[in-house]
């Protein structure tokens, strides 16, 4: 079986590309070639920019694939381009959408593929919905063999998943936890969330590839484990050997102070969600997510702590977090602890 992965070196897609090579797929990655170290041994790399349609058409000349998996399309015109490029060139086109497309706020925390798609808080999610609409239209009108896949919060070796952080990722929060300094948690920390290890996602996705029953279907792939945000932070703290000092601030307040948080919080993480994985388990017999978060995050921390290049300090976020926590503690009547810099 021949697979083309558009992308193939990101958090989700790198696990997929590794698994396909390991299980005997003839695997080709198409990307700009900026992460060659993440291309698994045994995979072929086509270097190209999907934004240059004519150049990509030249790269694809004479090539056909059983499956094309699109990891890096975010706008409707990008999937319209893909429909032109891959119509008649693949047996299945898999679009990686997002579980953030599900209705926010949800009418029910129990999420199935039949849950409505609507997210007024996040343009990213609305664009994914629009992409799905385009592809389903091509499926209905032209027979384009599409499968829609919706991952939720998926993590791998290169980053610890947390709820609130700056643009540089979560390393700054890990530093604060290790140093015993308070960290922000949105809301009261009791909303339920699902974290999925990328190797579990990869196994679920692999079972959909080349699967004729998946054509025309939308499927999410997540863990069955539901944890509160307080539990998530405490699990991370336990892996670091520290009990985290959690300071809770309403999501709406955080968004008012930093509007860039609106999509990730009000459009996603602030809502309790429990995913029903009945559909993927029916399409992929035997599939089950097996990496428990307390074990998966220790593997991630081992990798992050041994790779200084991903330990990105974020002074702007650090200053923002200090200010918000100071005001939250003062408003709650808590006494700030002393520290060398005079803040805590």
Image (cartoon, rainbow, N blue to C red):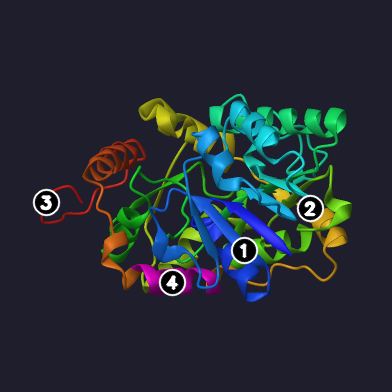
At 51% from the left edge and 33% from the top edge, which residue is drawn? Answer: 263
Q: Which residue is mark 3?
A: 341
Label 2, label 4: how far apart the Cα atoms are: 29 Å
Residue 295 image point, x, y percent: 54, 74
Mark 2 nearby-residue class (10 Å; few <14, some 14–19, many ≥20) = some
Q: Nearer the viewer, mark 2 or mark 3?
A: 2
Overall secondary structure of the magenta section: helix
Q: Verify whether residue 170 appears in magenta.
A: no
Q: Nearer the viewer, mark 2 or mark 4?
A: 2
Q: Which residue is mark 4?
A: 238
Residue 145 image point, x, y percent: 81, 43
Sequence-wise, the earlier of marks 2 and 4 is: 4
Please report contact status of discs 1 and 2: CB closer than 8 Å, yes or no: no
Quadrant the N terminus occupies? bottom right
Label 1, label 2: how far apart the Cα atoms are: 30 Å
SS label for mark 4 = helix
Sequence-wise, the earlier of marks 2 and 3 is: 2
At 24% from the left edge and 40% from the top edge, which residue is drawn? Answer: 316
Q: Which residue is mark 1?
A: 27
Foreground of the two, 282 or 1: 1
Q: Which residue is mark 2?
A: 276
Residue 193 image point, x, y percent: 61, 52
Q: Quadrant of residue 106?
A: top right
Sequence-wise, the earlier of marks 1 and 3 is: 1
Q: Verify whether residue 300 appears in magenta.
A: yes
**Highlighted magenta segment, given as a residue range:** 295-304
């Amino acid at each position: 079986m021949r697979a083309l992965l558009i992308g193939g070196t990101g958090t989700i897609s790198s696990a997929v590309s590794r698994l396909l090579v390991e299980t005997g797929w003839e695997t080709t990655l198409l990307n700009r070639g900026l992460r060659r170290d993440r291309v698994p041994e045994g995979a072929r790399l086509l270097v190209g920019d999907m934004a240059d349609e004519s150049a990509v058409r030249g790269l694809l000349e004479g090539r056909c694939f059983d499956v094309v998996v699109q990891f890096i399309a975010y706008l409707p015109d990008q999937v319209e381009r893909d429909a032109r490029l891959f119509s008649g060139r693949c047996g299945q086109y898999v679009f990686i959408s997002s579980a953030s497309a599900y209705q926010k706020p949800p009418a029910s925390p129990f999420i199935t593929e039949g849950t409505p798609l609507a997210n007024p808080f996040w343009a990213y999610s609305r664009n994914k919905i629009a992409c799905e609409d385009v592809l389903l239209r091509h499926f209905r009108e032209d027979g384009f063999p599409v499968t829609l896949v919706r991952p939720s919060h998926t993590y791998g070796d290169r980053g610890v998943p947390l709820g609130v952080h700056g643009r540089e990722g979560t390393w700054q929060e890990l530093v604060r936890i290790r140093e015993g300094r308070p960290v922000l948690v949105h809301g009261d920390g009791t909303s339920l969330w699902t974290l999925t290890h990328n190797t579990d996602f990869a196994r679920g996705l692999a079972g959909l590839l080349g699967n004729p029953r998946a054509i025309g279907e939308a499927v999410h792939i997540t863990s069955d484990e539901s944890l509160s945000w307080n539990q998530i932070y405490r699990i991370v703290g336990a892996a670091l050997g520290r009990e985290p000092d959690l300071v809770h601030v309403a999501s709406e307040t955080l968004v008012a102070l930093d509007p860039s948080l609106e999509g990730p919080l009000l459009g996603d993480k602030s809502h309790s969600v429990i995913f029903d994985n009945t559909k993927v388990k029916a399409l992929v017999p035997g599939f089950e997510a097996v990496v428990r978060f307390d074990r998966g995050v220790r593997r991630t921390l081992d990798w992050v702590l041994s790779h200084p290049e991903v330990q990105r300090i974020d002074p702007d976020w650090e200053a923002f977090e200090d200010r918000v926590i100071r005001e939250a503690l003062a408003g709650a009547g808590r006494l700030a602890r002393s520290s060398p810099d005079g803040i805590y």
